[in-house]
Image (spheres, rainbow, N blue to C red):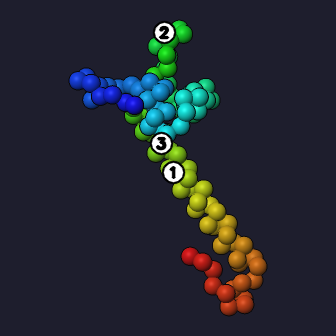
Amino acid sequence: MIQHGPGDAIGRFLSVADAAEVLAVDVETVHDLIRSGELPAIRVGERGPWRIERTQLEVWIDDQYEATRRHSVWHQGEFANVVELSGARSRGIRPVD
């Protein structure tokens, strides 16, 4: 659970565990995102803990929403083309908007 102390309200970085809690995933999933380069993070020291900047996590979340939106729009467009190719319009069937 993220604990907010006196200086934490303006804290810049989250631990991997905190990021996992925000995303409602396990810690290993966040580590996988960091290792793949999908989620920007820095390591404190040569072998120290990973830290994720709050703003970077928010940007990543926004990017995921946008990717989901684009995927949905693409599939809607793909379905509309299937209706057109199937001759539904010539049979008086209206495509779903």
Q: Secondary structure at mark 3?
A: helix
| Residue ID at (60%, 56%) | 71
Q: Earlier in the sequence, mark 2 or mark 3?
A: 2
Quadrant in which the C terminus is drawn: bottom right
Q: CA distance from mark 1 to mark 2?
A: 34 Å
Quadrant in which the N terminus is drawn: top left
Q: CA distance from mark 3 to mark 1?
A: 9 Å
| Residue ID at (29%, 28%) | 4
Q: Amino acid at mark 2?
A: Gly
One can see residue 33 in this view: no
Of the pair 64 and 81, the residue shown nearer to us: 64
Q: Amino acid at mark 1?
A: Glu
- C-beta proximity under 8 Å, tags 1 and 2: no
| Residue ID at (72%, 73%) | 82
Q: Earlier in the sequence, mark 3 or mark 1?
A: 3
Question: Could you tell me residue 32's position as x and y percent?
Answer: 61, 29
Question: Could you tell me residue 30's position as x and y percent?
Answer: 55, 31
- Could you say which disc has been placed on residue 61 in the image? 3
Crowding near the residue tagged with mark 2, few <14, some 14–19, many ≥20 C-alpha atoms within 10 Å: few
- Residue underneath mark 2: 45
- Residue underneath mark 1: 66
Q: Is residue 9 left or right of residue 75?
A: left
